[in-house]
Image (spheres, rainbow, N blue to C red):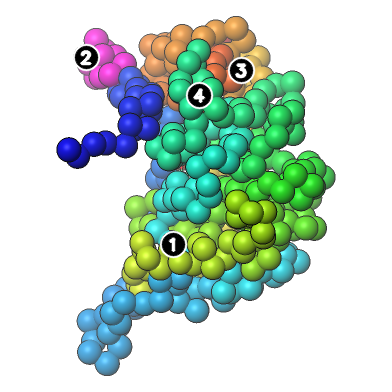
Amino acid sequence: MITINENYLKLQASYLFSDIAKRVAAFQQNNPGRDIIKLGIGDVTRPLPPACVEALHAATDEMANEATFRGYGPEQGYAFLREAIAENDFRSRGADIAADEIFVSDGAKCDTGNIQEIFATEVKIAIPDPVYPVYLDTNVMAGRTGAFADGRYQGICYLDSVKGNNFVPDLPTQPVDLIYLCFPNNPTGSTITKEQLKTWVDYARSNKALILFDAAYEAFIRDESLPRSIYEVEGAREVAIEFRSFSKTAGFTGTRCAYTVVPKECAAFDSAGNKQLLHPLWNRRHCTKFNGVSYPIQKAAAAVYSDAGKRQVRELTDYYLRNAVLIKKEMTALGFVSVGGDNSPYIWIDGQGRDSWEFFDMLLNKAGVVCTPGAGFGKCGQGYIRLSAFNSHENVIKAMERISQALQ
Ligand code: PLP
């Protein structure tokens, strides 16, 4: 008899985006002709930078010519892209990362979801709350979380990210083995200082733990004192894996390209307590289950590191940051306290005692603006909403005018 992986039955159905869609549809039905502005989604809206488009076209032409056609490429990514990443994203900032420590992939979602496969089922997981749901759900599927009761999985150590700790979780008070961190954070938009990150690296080193650091929003950091990579912290090479993505950096959400860094010293332990390096393990996993990102897409990603690409990526992220600054300014003027929006495209707004969905309904019904209710990202998200800067500047201006008029 074929049986299922019953861990899948423990997954909590995510009604978040379907509930949002239902409420938006009901609003449209009751208010025909009223247009809605969506500041809820985490998807980008601006087109690819011209340097990337040019590289994509040129690479497509190469694929059309017998002399330059390419079939399967290296699973880990072409050297031209891995070299450009190592040089520009790490070595130029004093982080010692080599090209062969970089694994190019088709998304940070897949990588942050798949990485748990190389660890034992018994490891104790620490996951922030609120959180990008992929970290949690992939561990539910793997059977690491225990049962769901009272709004939480009983086997998970939740790292509360709340006003009291300025949305940067405190070190766990119980022993944990695998720690997920994401900065700049989705959904809160909070950032972490080098000193704070060092306390996590030191914790991992002294407790034989490992940090999975998701830096998908690194390109939005403008405060030069903030770390862009965990490898800017001394000692991190032994205890941290980092995830990056071209999705939000360069508008690749529909084009798909990302990468994961596994330093050669990074290690975990076998059941006998012997140190086992993770680079060969992840390499084996990656090469067995993944066949590489297409050549034209890798060429487009490499163009991010050309002079023109760097300038255009900066303009692109500046565009969204201008939206974020405006959202934050207007919400502050209306008396709302928020975090994020300065080095991040997300603004996490305290509903001042309102339930997340009540706040959502108020913005939808009074202003025709769609946000994301914070409760959808975890228990600690209750009472908050997330506004996203991923929309046109004109729409953001209009949305904020409508919110101001509606709430004043
Ligand atoms: N990590 C975080 C924190 C995200 O918010 C997202 C996308 O929203 C991803 C990873 C996924 O990135 P990718 O498009 O590379 O799969």
Whole-Å distance between the Cαs marked 1 and 2?
49 Å
Number of residues whose C-alpha sits closer than 10 Å to that of mark 1, classed few (under 14), some (14–19) or many (20 or more): some
User: Compared to 297, does 199 lie above or below?
Assistant: above
Give the amino acid at mark 4.
Tyr
> In the figure, 389 relative to 333: above or below?
below
Residue appearing at x 45%, y 13% in the figure: 357
Q: Residue at x 43, y 63 (%)?
A: 286
Mark 3 vs mark 1, foreground winner is 1
Kind of residue indicated by mark 1:
Arg
Main secondary structure type of the part rendered in magenta: helix
- Label 2 sits on what residue type? Gln
Mark closest to the chain's N terminus, 1 or 2: 2
Residue placed most toward the observer, 193 or 393: 193
Whichever of callouts 3 and 1 sits on the residue coming sooner in the sequence is 1
In terms of sequence position, does the residue under pointer 4 or pointer 1 come before the other? 4
Q: Which mark is residue 232?
A: none
Stretch in magenta = 22-35
Query: What residue does disc 4 label?
Result: 153
Q: CA distance from mark 4 to mark 1?
A: 27 Å
Which residue lies at the image location 41% right of the left edge and 12% below the top edge?
A: 361
Question: To which residue does mark 1 refer?
Answer: 285
The label on residue 29 is 2
